[in-house]
Image (cartoon, helix red, strand yellow):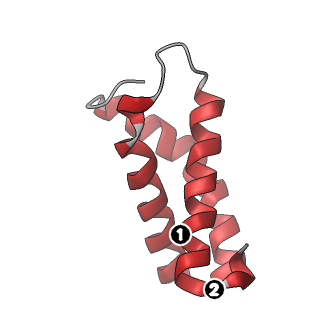
Amino acid sequence: MRAGDEAAVEQVVRACGGRLLAVARRIVGSEEDARDVVQDAFMSAFRSLDRCEGHAKLSTWLHRARQALRTLLARHFGSAAS
């Protein structure tokens, strides 16, 4: 996946967005807040694509997206999100 590859971005969001949304929804309790947090997490992860090594696995990048989600949840909703 390369920065600017919209088809790849859409594929990743479709493949992983549901799982991230389910985690966020359980933590924040609000569909709207969960969607906002997941969107922020994806944006943060996509912005870091240029720092990823070309041979890095997608699973490594997705782990970073989950870390970004946890960080954003903790920042927005306190320590209960950790």
Q: Which residue is mark 2?
A: 78
What residue appears at the point 48 percent right and 58 percent down from the top-left corner? 41
What residue appears at the point 60 percent right and 40 percent down from the top-left corner? 62
Q: Quadrant of residue 59?
A: top right
Q: Is residue 18 above or below residue 80?
A: above
What residue appears at the point 59 percent right and 74 percent down from the top-left corner? 73
Q: Distance between the Cα atoms at labels 1 and 2?
A: 10 Å
Q: Amino acid at mark 2?
A: Gly
What residue appears at the point 59 percent right and 85 percent down from the top-left corner? 77
Q: Is residue 26 above or below residue 30?
A: above
Q: Looking at the rendering, in which quadrant would you find the N terminus?
A: top left
Q: What percent of the width, then of the height, locates residue 81? A: 70, 77
Task: Check residue 72 in the rendering and tell me which mark sits there, or answer none.
Answer: 1
From the viewer's perspective, tell me whether residue 11 is left or right of residue 2.
right
Q: Is residue 74 above or below residue 2?
A: below
From the viewer's perspective, tell me whether residue 39 is left or right of residue 81.
left
Task: Check residue 58 in the rendering and tell me which mark sits there, or answer none.
Answer: none
Q: Amino acid at mark 1?
A: Leu
For numbered disc 2, what is the local secondary structure?
Answer: loop
Q: Quadrant of residue 28?
A: bottom right
- Looking at the image, tell me whether mark 1 or mark 2 is earlier in sequence order: 1
Q: What percent of the width, then of the height, locates residue 8? A: 40, 30
Q: What percent of the width, then of the height, locates residue 58? A: 58, 28
For numbered disc 1, what is the local secondary structure?
Answer: helix
Q: What percent of the width, then of the height, locates residue 60? A: 63, 32
Disc 1: CA contacts within 10 A as few (<14), some (14-19) or many (>=20): many
